[in-house]
Amino acid sequence: MNIQQHRRRLLPTVLAAVTAAILLVTAPGAANADELDPQPVGGGATVPLEITGFDAAVARTNGYELRYDDAGTAWIVAQSARAGDFTDGVALPASVAGNGPAPGTGPEVTPFNTATGSCGTSWIYFTSSTRYRTGFNVNVGNIAYRNWVVTKSSSTSGSVTDNFSAFMNASSWQEYRDFGLSGSSRRVEVTTGTVTTFLGAVCSTIGPWDIW
């Protein structure tokens, strides 16, 4: 069974939550990643999502594992893949996976602060003085969970957060949200932006922001 077939498998423990997330991202205020405004009003920012970790437990639950080729490069591959076959695999940066340890000997979750491998893009934009949108598009399989928080502030209202974290089963997501603060010097920034794919790849954003 190849990577494309495996991407459709859900974590057994989060089926109900994934269903709820699908309802969430199709509700009013949410939009598909390809339904973008033709010209963001406030300028905005689009920045890379980078592979910053590997979750072995998530990968194993969904039929994947970490294997190393003869050069020491780590690959996420289907457990059913033939030995030495990395055709449908996803390579991990050396800073994330290490360089050549035996599979299964590392920690369950390996976090890193330095991003070295691109796995998609993320963004945040003001679409008017009272509304913004944020989202991402990932190229290493569907997302099982997003940990996504936006901090917004203005000259008279201080700062507050909007939490978009949720289980999901898609490779892209975006949502519109009312800014909800008065005053000038309006700013929005993705201050927490991490997604975990069904393959076990953990991707983080490099903090996009926008001002109005």
Image (cartoon, rainbow, N blue to C red):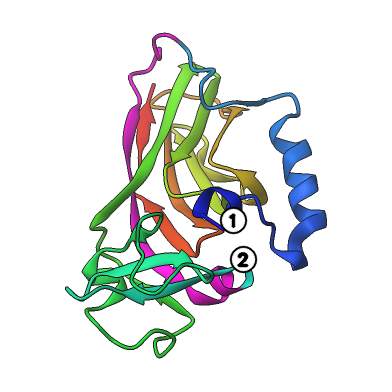
Question: Is residue 144 something that shows in the picture?
Answer: no
Give yes or no for residue 83 being in the magenta stretch: no
Residue beneath disc 1: 6
Above or below residue 6? Residue 31 is: above
Chain-order first, disc 2 or disc 1? 1
Highlighted magenta segment, given as a residue range = 38-60
Give yes or no for residue 41 being in the magenta stretch: yes
* Quarter where residue 16 is shown: bottom right
Q: CA distance from mark 2 to mark 1?
A: 7 Å
Q: Quadrant of the C terminus?
A: top left
Can you give x and y, in whole percent of width and height, for residue 161 in the image?
56, 46
Q: Is residue 41 left or right of residue 162?
A: left
Can you give x and y, in whole percent of width and height, for residue 197 in the image?
52, 56
Whether tag 2 and tag 1 are in contact, CB under 8 A, the answer is: yes
The disc label shown at residue 19, or none: none
The disc label shown at residue 62, or none: 2
* Quarter where residue 190 is shown: top left
Question: Is residue 7 something that shows in the picture?
Answer: yes
